[in-house]
Image (tube, grey):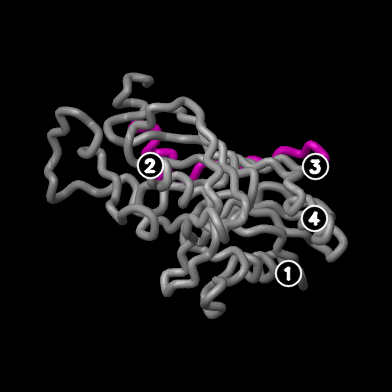
């Protein structure tokens, strides 16, 4: 079986490079373990670029869109745009449960806990302002596909906010449970062999889908194959195909 690439290039010009990264790859080195393979160094090596600059991060377990600046001036401008919330972000996620709402805004204040698992917690007194808009796309069985639009950029923000609403992201061992998603768990009258069934998704069900930059440029990272396959199966069970 062919191993999928760790990343693919979506867009590149003299100022930035945008890539679609796989789950399990750190963007700029793990915050607590710099020994791990990292996306920025892979790009520098593969493209023979002396230096690229990390503008923003997504979790190691999250797949999807990441942009880097090619020089210090554009790094400063983009970093400021993210800080001032002038970059619009869209994520696709699969969660446990069936939300009763179509759209909801979560504004629970968040702060890093500093524990051994490096979790983020809700703290209405010491937490920083955090806001995520969630949109329910559809449900299938006891799972749902959501779109998340984070207005702030706290560590693990989408994951913590989704869990606080009672709908943790699937395969999230920090804020939910590490239970792989199988077809038998949402397809009625499934007839397969439970001992032979392979999971459709066995990693964090979160994908950074799209960024809209201040100049209006829209960058989109196609869904990772595992998440895309799971969503298609969920739609099929709902009679959409």
Answer above or below: position of 23 versus 131.
below
Q: Which residue is mark 4?
A: 80
Closer to viewer: mark 3 or mark 4? 4
Rendered image quadrant of residue 191: top left
Disc 3 versus disc 4: distance between alpha carbons? 11 Å
Rendered image quadrant of residue 235: top left
Answer above or below: position of 101 versus 27.
above
Disc 3 versus disc 2: distance between alpha carbons? 32 Å
77 or 111, which is in the foreground?
111
Looking at marks 4 and 1 on the same chain, the residue that comes earlier in the sequence is marked by 1
Magenta stretch in the rendered image? 214-234
Question: Is mark 3 in CB contact (under 8 Å) with mark 4?
Answer: no
Looking at marks 3 and 1 on the same chain, the residue that comes earlier in the sequence is marked by 1
Q: In the drawing, what numbered circle is on residue 167?
A: 2
Residue at 51% in and 32% down? 104
The local crowd at label 3, few if under 14, some if 14 to 19, many if 20 or more residues have their Cα within 10 Å, is some
Looking at marks 4 and 2 on the same chain, the residue that comes earlier in the sequence is marked by 4
**In the image, is residue 184 part of the stretch drawn in magenta?**
no
Q: Which residue is mark 3?
A: 214
Disc 1 versus disc 2: distance between alpha carbons? 43 Å
Q: Which residue is mark 1?
A: 48
Looking at marks 1 and 2 on the same chain, the residue that comes earlier in the sequence is marked by 1
The local crowd at label 1, few if under 14, some if 14 to 19, many if 20 or more residues have their Cα within 10 Å, is few
Disc 4 versus disc 2: distance between alpha carbons? 32 Å
Closer to viewer: mark 3 or mark 1? 3
Looking at marks 3 and 2 on the same chain, the residue that comes earlier in the sequence is marked by 2
Horizontal and vertical percent position of residue 28: 62, 68
């Amino acid at each position: 079986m062919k191993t999928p690439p760790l990343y693919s290039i979506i867009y590149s010009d003299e100022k930035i490079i945008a890539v679609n990264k796989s789950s399990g790859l750190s963007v700029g080195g793990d915050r607590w373990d710099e020994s791990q393979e990292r996306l920025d160094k892979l790009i520098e090596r593969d493209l023979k670029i002396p230096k690229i600059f990390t503008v923003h991060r997504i979790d190691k377990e999250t797949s999807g869109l990441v942009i880097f600046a090619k020089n210090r001036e554009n790094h400063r401008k983009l970093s400021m745009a993210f800080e001032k919330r002038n970059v619009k972000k869209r994520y696709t996620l699969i969660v446990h449960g069936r939300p009763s709402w179509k759209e909801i805004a979560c504004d629970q204040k968040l702060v890093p806990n500093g524990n051994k698992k490096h979790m983020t917690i809700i703290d209405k007194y010491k937490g920083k302002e955090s806001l995520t808009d969630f949109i329910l796309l559809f449900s299938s069985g006891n799972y749902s596909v959501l779109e998340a639009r984070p207005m702030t950029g706290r560590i693990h923000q989408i994951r913590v906010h989704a869990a606080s609403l009672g709908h943790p992201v699937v395969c999230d061992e920090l804020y939910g449970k590490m239970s792989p998603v199988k077809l038998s768990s949402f397809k009625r009258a499934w007839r397969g062999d439970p001992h032979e069934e392979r999971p459709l998704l066995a990693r964090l069900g979160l994908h950074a889908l799209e960024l809209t930059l201040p100049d209006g440029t829209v960058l989109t990272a196609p869904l990772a194959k595992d998440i895309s396959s799971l969503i298609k199966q969920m739609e099929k069970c709902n009679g959409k195909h």
